[in-house]
Amino acid sequence: MKKIAVIYWSGTGSTQAMAQAILEGAQGVNPEAELFEVSAISADDAAAYDVLVLGCPAMGAEELEDSEFEPFFSALESRLGGKSVALFGSYGWGDGEWMRTWTERVSAAGAQLISSEGLIVCGQPDEDSLSSCRKLGQDAAAI
């Protein structure tokens, strides 16, 4: 089986809840799928995984969190070529621009997006949102 990592940053717990649901779905297909807070893994270590599921909420003017996640992602970005990548995150305002920008960056880096639009949830994820997260995890682990 391919090595899969779910890596996220969360400020309020919404993106963390999404990450945990994604892991549940992934482990149903691949019990060795792993979950990491972004502070617990380096870009070098993340690049060793075949499938990456990356999560970050919208921050500021619909941008990736800039103190931990953006530096991690910037260091990883050039190593995404040929990898399967899924993106997810929560937001509380705007229209999802941060996710559109992020998916464009991932595509430009040569990765195969598992979901071309990414998975976004406004506010706290409800049971329907968590079900979508589990499905994303299953899809990612099935690659």
Image (cartoon, rainbow, N blue to C red):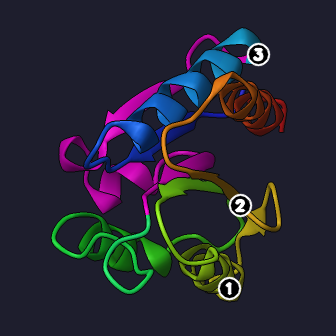
Residue 43 left/right relative to 66: right
Tell me the mark number nearer the camera, choosing from 3 and 2: 2
Image spot of residue 35 (x, y percent): 42, 29
Image spot of residue 86 (x, y percent): 67, 54
Q: Earlier in the sequence, mark 3 or mark 2?
A: 3
Q: Say which residue label 3 marks.
A: 29
Q: Are marks 3 and 1 in contact (CB under 8 Å)?
A: no
Q: Regarding mark 3 in the picture, which secondary structure is present there?
A: helix
Q: Earlier in the sequence, mark 1 or mark 2?
A: 1
Circle 2 Cα neighbour tier, 10 Å, few/some/many (<14 / 14–19 / ≥20) = many
Q: Distance between the residues labelled 3 and 2?
A: 20 Å
Q: Regarding mark 1 in the picture, which secondary structure is present there?
A: helix
Q: Say which residue label 1 marks.
A: 104
Residue 22 left/right relative to 119: left
Residue in front for this viewpoint, 73 or 117: 117
**Which residues, given as a range, are shown in magenta?**
30-57
Image spot of residue 6 (x, y percent): 50, 39
Q: Say which residue label 2 marks.
A: 118
Which amino acid type corresponds to the residue marked 1 in the rendered image?
Glu
Q: Regarding mark 2 in the picture, which secondary structure is present there?
A: loop
Circle 3 Cα neighbour tier, 10 Å, few/some/many (<14 / 14–19 / ≥20) = some
Image spot of residue 110 (x, y percent): 70, 80
